[in-house]
Amino acid sequence: MTVQLLERRATQPAAAVKMAIADCDIHPSPKSMEKEVYPYLEKRWQRHLETYGVRPRQGFANGPAFPKGQPDASRRDAYPPNGGRPGSDLDFMRQQHLDPYNVQLGILNPLRGGQGVQNGDFSAALCRAINDWQIAEWTSKEPRLKGSVVVPYEDAAASAAEIDARAGDTNFAQVLVLSRTAEPLGQRRYWPIYEAAARAKLPVAVHAFGYGGFPVTGGGWPSYYIEEMVGHAQCNQSVLTSMVMEGIFERLPTLKVILVEGGFAWLPALAWRLDKVWTRLRDETPHVKRPPSSYIRQQVWVTSQPTEEPEPRRHLLDTIEWMGWDRLLFATDYPHWDFDDPTQVLPPRVGEQQRRQFFMENARAVYGITG
Amino acid sequence: MSRHVIAATRDLPPGGRRVVTIKGRAIAIFNIAGEYFGLLNRCPHQGGNLGEGRLIGLVESGEPGDYRYSRPGEILRCPWHGWEFDLRSGRSRCDPARIQAKCFAVRVAPGEALGEGDYVLETFPVTVEENYVVVEV
Ligand code: FES
């Protein structure tokens, strides 16, 4: 736990941020499925949704495996005054988040957008509708926001078709998959997704969570939400290890992967361990030609939130040095409860150049979006 | 220190809350069962708006299976990461000695006393028949 306290300032936090920032993890929700998403969903699937609901690939039919830290996993102050779920009102998002924090580039990651749904055709139809909805309700109205191509990732061919259909559309900045899938994400069945993303020149973001049906940890089902929260770091390590060792980065040298919301302090240690073992076991995976860390160093980025908060805080800076300041993308996770405030997330002594990389330049580089 | 009149008591009844800005500082004022409390509207963790936090009670436990619930409504939970603060002292539940939200004294003054000089009336007229909520900043 951190006990690093705020210095008391007379100003509100928002007023203190001048620098333009990129927020690489914002969660929008539809105000209403009927009004906002049905226009893009065939009648047949509207009826299916009403009759059968959404069945994720896990035993918990009605939601996540653990109750969240706050209702709807959201900041209590993020409910729009005119009603609706947190993250469902663009004007309120502007007023509470984009304007005061000077967010000039915001990446939308719609969760529950049809991903991980057991009925494959329904999953594909919902993902397509959510992509259309992002354009209609968000990116066409607010140029600071960019969408994510959500794909029915358990069906790689359908996913690739969706990516191909969106290629070149500047409403979208990336392809989105979730980290908890039926098999580790590096495996062959998912390769068409990465090939299509590389063709479309879109990075693939792997957001923590999902519905693989397996426990988040490598050691079985945990008892508590806190274990799931820290379990995302383990899950992301497995995802990344799978991607490197299955040779995705070697096969697709232009592919960019962004790991979202799994923390990052584990990354240097994982890279050290992979390199060490690879030097001894490399004959087992001859398709991985270079040390694992060199692929990670060139083709993998991580978002900052939820930032580890060690005490003393300089340990955070050591960790970032080990992974490289160019690997880290700032994210708030707005409107979710474990939100990171950009005015507080870095210790005060971080220099101007590193702040610029962390808050904006790295994001522009990875998304290929110029100022 | 100055005393600021922020509302008539009938506009801030029990269960009511309001965020006011005084001398550039946002302060969250709560009426808990007729008693008034004021906290800087800025959580000492990352700056969450304490004025939008949920009010809960104090749960204490001496051993597994045994718990006591007391002081309903006097503990404020930050709307962001859920750190909890005692409205009476500003002290956090997780580390009361080191982590505290800044408190402001809030009391009720009758309208007739407000004419006597050292109150700051920001935005509204005062009548002698009413009582007013006054914050010291
Ligand atoms: S900002 Fe209040 S708990 Fe983090």
Image: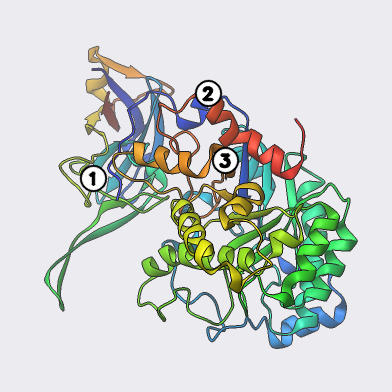
Estimate the spatial distance between the alpha carbons at disc 2 and disc 3, rounded to whole Å.
Answer: 26 Å
User: Which element type, helix, strand or loop, lies under badge 1?
Assistant: loop
User: In this figure, which residue is indicated by the disc labeled 2?
Assistant: A352
Mark yes or no: residue B47 visible. Answer: no
| Relative side of A91 to B111, left or right | right
Judging from the image, mark 3 belongs to the subunit labelled: A
| Relative side of A350 to B3, left or right | right
User: In this figure, which residue is indicated by the disc labeled 1?
Assistant: B87
Residue at the far left in the pictured view = B62
| Relative side of A340 to A38, left or right | left
User: In this figure, which residue is indicated by the disc labeled 3?
Assistant: A96
> For residue A252, what is the image quadrant?
bottom right
Of callouts 2 and 3, the N-terminal one? 3
Mark yes or no: residue A18 visible. Answer: yes
User: Which element type, helix, strand or loop, lies under badge 3?
Assistant: helix
Q: Residue at x 68, y 48 (%)?
A: A107
Judging from the image, mark 2 belongs to the subunit labelled: A
Query: Badges 3 and 1: C-beta atoms under 8 Å apart?
Result: no
For label 3, the crowd category at 10 Å Cα-Cα, with few meaning under 14, some 14 to 19 and many 20 or more, is some
Question: Label 1 sits on what residue type?
Answer: Leu
